[in-house]
Image (tube, rainbow, N blue to C red):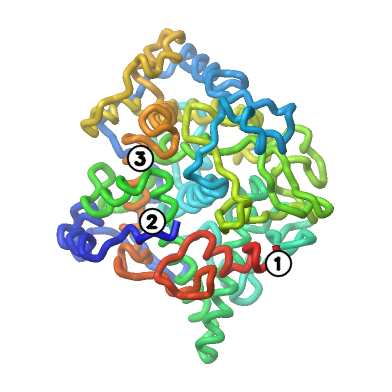
Amino acid sequence: MKGNPVLKRRELLKALASGALLGGASLLGMRAATAQHGGRRFFLSEDTFGRMFPRLAPFAQPSAQLTAALLDIGKPGGILDARDNLAAGPVALIVDPALSADNPNNPTHTAGTTFMGQFMDHDMTFDLTSVLGVPTDPEDSPNARTPAFDLDSVYGGGPRLSPELYSGIKFRIESGGLYEDLPRKSDHSAIIVDPRNDENIIIAGLHAAFLLFHNQAVDHLNQRHPRMHAEKVFEEARRLTTLHYHWMIVHEFLPLFIGRELTEEILYRGRKYYRPQVAFMPVEFNGAAYRFGHSMVRPSYRANLAGDHGQPFFAMIFDPAGQGQADPVDLRGGARAPRRFIGWQTFFDFADGNVKPNKRIDAKLSTPLFNLPLGTIASHQPPTSLAQRNLLRQVTWSMPSGQSIAREMDLEPLAASELSELRSYGLGLERSTPLWYYVLKEAEVRANGLTLGPVGGRIVGEVILGLLAHDRGSFLSRDPFWKPTLPTLNGQVTGDFRMIDFLAFAGVDPASRGQ
């Protein structure tokens, strides 16, 4: 994915002239509060959730019948369950094409796309207070993350305010045996800002890669500026880490999520529906559209090529048998053992033939997600079916239907016949569909599961680019013509930067490990 960057200078100049990047507001005329956070200035939200489509009515009125229907739709073995043959084992679920017939692979994505999306989610939103299935005003619910891709989930308050994360101006990093691991307490719980980044060993490995990237950036700066004050080195290392992260979001991952055409349309023609004066986190994004990533999760993964006594470590993403095990048979986090590290050649394409795909975006979730370990749930409360939790969240936020948002966007909604599996519940859900379900079905029907469809893609694209436009630390806001300054996988500064380059700079790529 080393093609031409999304941003084209001539088109970008036109976008800036028209104010498109800020949704019609000029860079200088934007009215917003600002504050200091970790040494960086950003447009400040009210730190609560809000609505992108405040005038639209809920998809349905709360009732016992509605709750029962949503729980049935999202139950193990229900219509959202891909019904993977878990008895076939983690290896067969990856290598046997016949076992993917009802839960197809996405040939345009690699397995790591899912977890970068999860990392981004944990960087911009965290709801700790709302109750599933209980209608709640979004403005009454605080967002525990800043609504920006500022890596507050990694940096916390910096070395002075979060000293437990640091050794000097570098992050603490430990080892579980063979390779890097997050720093951990005696009970093996991770010492990180956001505990969700230890839900599984892939997201934990990605978090560790960000720690190491910052540490390498510190060394990079010290070599080039040996007299630079330590505090300045820290801030510049954070800036470099954040800017290269932003570049990957805009040029690599957002086009994978929503398609390159829609990404460019929003960049150059502007946002239509997410146009706040001050950044905030819309529930239509957080509670529905951005949860499309749950459909991309595989039932099993190859974590690494040779960590299990010289053999590949294959495991289910979650397996009830792993509960209470010191070295779980699955890929849950919160444990430490020599085999529990990530070989990134499985997750991103290093052109060595080892990369694996993720699953398509459709109205099917891999079966292990219907029996989550309680430790992966922030509240540690059931239900343990991820699908049920997502569907109940549509009631929590009084979410509008996907059809009503489609009409608001002047798009043709999915027909009731395309959602006929919902008709038997007798509630009209095939005509007024919970937004999260609608987004998944729309991707399946309108985009063959390769990207999000028009409603889901527009919500996800506008919010992600909108948050970057409102963040004074992002290159879209500060310098839209900025290009990456750090070396890529081949050791050259090319003006582009992808995930394989990020991992190589962090020193966790296959070549750095002699793999």
Please tell me which residue is depicted at 73% across the width and 29% down the height of the picture: 88
Between the C-alphas of marks 2 and 3, the distance is: 14 Å
Residue 202: percent from left, percent from top: 63, 50
Residue 243: percent from left, percent from top: 43, 66
Whether the residues at callouts 2 and 3 have beta carbons within 8 Å, the answer is no
Residue closest to the eye, 135 or 113: 113
Q: Earlier in the sequence, mark 2 or mark 3?
A: 2
Please tell me which residue is depicted at 47% across the width and 44% down the height of the picture: 108
For the N terminus, the quadrant is bottom left
For the C terminus, the quadrant is bottom right
Q: Earlier in the sequence, mark 1 or mark 3?
A: 3
Quarter where residue 208 is shown: bottom right
Please tell me which residue is depicted at 44% across the width and 34% down the height of the picture: 449
- Label number found at residue 250: 2
Whether residue 277 appears in this view of the structure is yes
- Disc 2 on helix, strand or loop? helix
* Residue type beneath disc 3: Gly
Residue 172: percent from left, percent from top: 67, 68
The residue to which callout 1 is attached is 514
Between the C-alphas of marks 1 and 3, the distance is: 39 Å
* Residue type beneath disc 1: Gly
- Disc 3 on helix, strand or loop? helix
Residue 437: percent from left, percent from top: 44, 27
Count of all numbered marks drawn on residues in the image: 3
Between the C-alphas of marks 1 and 2, the distance is: 31 Å
